[in-house]
Amino acid sequence: MHESLIARVGRRAAGVSPSRLVHLAARVREVVAPQPWPFDEAAVGLYRCEQRGRGALPHPPYLYGLLAAARTARAVGAEEITALEFGVAGGNGLRALQEHAESVRSWYGVAVTVVGLDSGHGLLPATDPRDSPFALPEGEFAMDQAALAPHLDGTELVLGDVGRTVGPLMERVASGELPPLGFVAHDLDVFTGTHATLQAIGALPTGAALPRVPMYFDDISGYPYTTATGERAAITAFNEGPERRRIGQVENLEQTLGGSARWANWPRHMFVLHTFDHPDYGAPEKVTQMDLGLRSTLRSPSRP
Ligand SMILES: C[S@@+](CC[C@H](N)C(=O)[O-])C[C@H]1O[C@@H](n2cnc3c(N)ncnc32)[C@H](O)[C@@H]1O
C-alpha cells in the first residue's frame, strides 16, 4: 500500500531534531518569503512598503535609492536632498520618483526636490558608436509634455540636450539653490548623454553631494547594451577620472533584499557614487549590527 506524502513527511520529521527543524523552517521561509538583510535599513524599508499591501511598487529601485539616500542624509545632518531622473520620456519613472519622494519625506523627515531632465523630443542623433545607433534611432521615446504636465506636483522638468542642461543644473546644486545631490536615476539609454551627466556630477564641489549618492542605471542588461557601450561605458569612463570619486556597483544586492526584490533584476542595476574625500564620509549611518556570537546550534567538535 502506498504511503501518503503527508504521512511520509510526518514520519521523517519525527526523527529530526528540533534544532534541525528550526533550521529547515528558516530555509523554507527564505525561499517562500525572503526577508531583507537587517543591516540595510533601506532594504528593510522597501520590504515593509511592499508588505503594507499596496500592490506592486512602481519603480522599486527609485524607492530603494531614495531610502538609501535618506539614511546617508540623516547621518550627515542634511534635511533636504535633490533627486534626479535623466531620461523622462512618457514620465512613468518621474511620477514614481515624485511619489516615493513624498513617502520618504513623511517617513524620514528628509525633503526631496525632484528634477527630471529630457530632450523633450526623444533620443537625439547618435554622435558616438557607443550610443548603439543601430538599435536606438533618433526620436525614439518622445515625450508628451501636455499629458505629463498635470501629473507633476512640485517636480521640475528641464528640457533640452543634457549635454547643455546638466552643467547649469549642477551650478544650481553647487550654489545651494538646490539641496545636495542625493539620488540619481540614469535612463538616457545612450553613452553620450550619460557620459555628460556623470562628468558634470563628478565636477561638483565636495559637499554639494552626499558622501555616497545611490545611482540606478536602467540600461545595462541585455542586448544591445554591453560593457563597452551605453551607460556601462559611461561608468567606466567616469572611473578612469580622479580616484577620490568612484562609482561602484552594489554587488549581490538582490541577495540582501526581501519580498519580490529577491528575484528581481533591478538590484543588479544599483550603484553608489562615492566621494571619498567628503569631510563627512565616515559619519555613522544607522545600521543594525549582525549578531556574530557563537550559535548554540553549531555542533561541538567531536572529542578525539
Ligand atoms: C528610455 S527613455 C526614458 C524612460 C523613462 N525614464 C520612463 O520611466 O519611462 C530615454 C529618454 O532619454 C532621453 N535622452 C536621451 N539622450 C538625451 C540627451 N542627450 N538629452 C536629453 N534627453 C536625452 C530621450 O528623450 C528619452 O526620452
Image: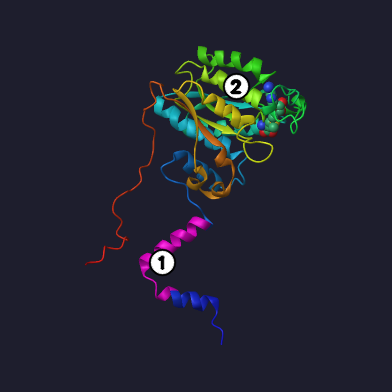
Q: Position of residue 115 (x, y in %)?
A: 61, 23
Q: Position of residue 89 (x, y in %)?
A: 71, 29
Q: In the rendered view, does 80 fall on the left or right side of 153?
A: left
Secondary structure type for disc 1: helix
Q: Which residue matches tag 2?
A: 197
Q: What residue occupies the far bottom of the structure in this picture?
A: 1
Find out whether residue 27 is within the magenta segment: yes
Q: Which residue matches tag 1?
A: 21
Relative depth, front residue between 69 and 211: 211
Relative depth, front residue between 282 and 54: 282
Sort mark 1 into few (<14), some (14-19) or many (20+) by Cα contacts within 10 Å: few
Q: How many marks?
A: 2
Q: Is residue 81 visible?
A: yes
Residue range in magenta is: 13-31
Q: Position of residue 92 (x, y in %)?
A: 68, 34
How far apart are labels 1 and 2 at the CA level? 53 Å
- Which label sits on residue 78? none
Relative depth, front residue between 117 and 126: 126
**Which is nearer the N-term, disc 1 or disc 2?**
1
Residue type at tag 2: Thr
